[in-house]
Image (cartoon, grey):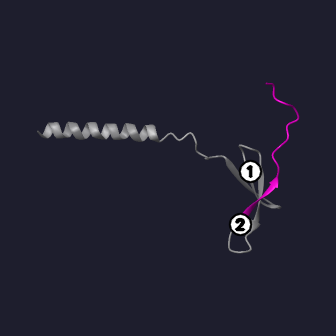
Amino acid sequence: MKQYIMGMLTGASLILCAVMFIGASDNNSNYGKYQMTHTDLGLRLLDTATGQVYKAKKNTSGGGYIWDEYSTKPKFLFKPWN
């Protein structure tokens, strides 16, 4: 009986590990999408997916910063082939 219970616990833990490893891959993550830099002009935030740049403004109604649009999306010099 003891060996049966140990086998059940081992099987359950293997199934749990498999489920955790399958669920650990998140392809919709925004990890690495934004890059921040500090220059003499202040804080800048780059959206690497769109090329949009934001600048930090001090929040007058409270603490912290508000990200304001600094530049528009880049314009391409050529049209992609369809």
Vertical position of residue 70 compared to residue 64: above or below? above
The circle on residue 20 is none
Q: Is residue 57 above or below residue 11?
A: below
Image quadrant where residue 3 sits: top left
Question: Residue at image x 72%, y 45%?
Answer: 48
Report x, y in % for residue 68: 77, 60
Spatial separation of the CA atoms under disc 1 and disc 2:
15 Å
CA neighbours of label 2 inside 10 A, class few (<14), some (14 to 19), many (20+): few
Residue nearer the viewer, 76 or 10: 76
Asked if the stretch drawn in magenta spans residue 15, the answer is no
Dot 1, how many residues are within 10 Å of its Cα: few (below 14), some (14-19), or many (20+)? some
Is 76 contained in the magenta span? Answer: yes
Quadrant location of the N terminus in the rendered image: top left
Amino acid type at circle 2 is: Tyr
Estimate the x, y position of residue 65 in percent, counting from the top left: 71, 66
Of label 1 and label 2, which has the lower sequence position? 1
Name the residue nearer the viewer: 36 or 40.
Answer: 36
Q: Is residue 78 left or right of residue 7?
A: right
Q: Residue at label 1?
A: 46
Q: Which mark is residue 65?
A: 2
* 43 lies left or right of 11: right
Q: Position of residue 38 (x, y in %)?
A: 76, 59
